[in-house]
Image (cartoon, grey):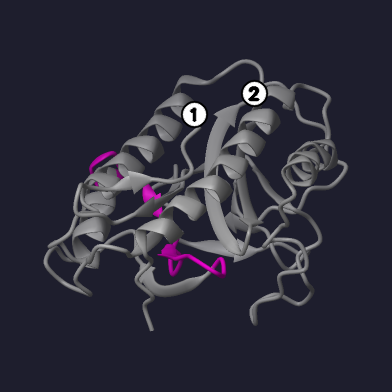
Amino acid sequence: MVELKADTSIDAMRESGRVVARALSAVRRAAAVGVTLRDLDEVAHQVLKDAGATSPFLHYHPSFAPVPFPATLCTSVNDAVVHGVPDGYRLCDGDLLSVDFGAVLDGWAGDSAISFIVGTPRPEDVRLIETAERALAAGIAAAVVGNRIGDIAHAIGTVCRTAGYGILEGFGGHGIGRTMHEDPGVPNEGRPGSGMPLRHGMVLAIEPMLLAGGKDFFHTAPDGWTLRTDDGSRAAHAEHTVAITRAGPRVLTAL
């Protein structure tokens, strides 16, 4: 069932979204050669603590995972697409890091992700990240009253496929509100004009996940969480929580 949020609830979700944005900004500033992924998780956790918010990631245990998620931050490096577990890995010059983070404040969730290069960038990685961001922007632009879920999916997929990238098979965005994952699902590829109509008060996490090798296939790492590209190519992830309003899409996780 899809819950339509009142305008006051969307305002409250904007506050949780600000916490998410601050945490991602802090993590990006802290990420440097030699810093561990666990260090970055501590940075994000401190932002939560300072805001009086909690983590929807920590101890999250969906049916596909063998153990609950052990951190507040997902840190996916290079060929890891999503769900990377922060550990003692020290960032190296040229690493492509995707960071996914969520917060719950006053009972409302926010969810967002960014990708960036640590140290010296490679042109092909810059292009991959820029394309993920363009795909996200296209999906957000399609998130208007009167469109359908398929219009968002088609907008994202067109950007990704035109650039020659793969799309993580079987994963996409989702509704969000009192919990991190709600109906409806938001695929990253689809047919325009298909799917559920978009209505004022719907709130969606829109999140393209691009695979540089052009294939869609992945495997799960031994930790039971991290999803890696089958061909070893790099990946990028971009995400915002977006409210559908009569005035147009409202990005709730922008800085």
Residue 250 position within the rendered picture, expressed as x and y whole percent measured from the top left:
33, 46
The tag earlier along the polypeptide, 2 or 1, is: 2
SS under mark 2: loop
What residue does disc 2 label? 94
Crowdedness near tag 2: few (<14), some (14–19) or many (≥20) residues, C-alpha within 10 Å: some
| Mark 1, residue position | 125
Q: Label 1 amino acid?
A: Asp
Q: Nearer the viewer, residue 176 or 231?
A: 176
Q: Residue furthest right?
A: 88
Please say if the residues under marks 2 and 1 sit with CB atoms less than 8 Å apart: yes
| Crowding at mark 1 (Cα within 10 Å: few <14, some 14-19, many 20+) | many
Picture quadrant where residue 35 is located: top right
Residue 157: image x %, image y %? 27, 53
Dominant secondary structure (helix, strand or loop) of the stretch shown in magenta:
loop
- Give the residue at the far top of this rendering: 120
User: Which residues lie in the magenta part?
Assistant: 160-180
- Residue 7: name its quadrant: bottom left
Secondary structure of the residue carrying numbered label 1: helix
On the image, the x and y values in percent for residue 181 come to 52, 70
Q: Which amino acid, mark 2?
A: Gly
Where residue 229 appears, as percent x and y from the top left, is: 55, 54
Camera-side residue: 199 or 66? 199
On the rendered image, what quadrant is the N terminus found in?
bottom left
Residue at mark 2 to residue at mark 1: CA–CA distance: 9 Å
Relative to 147, is 77 on the left or the right? right
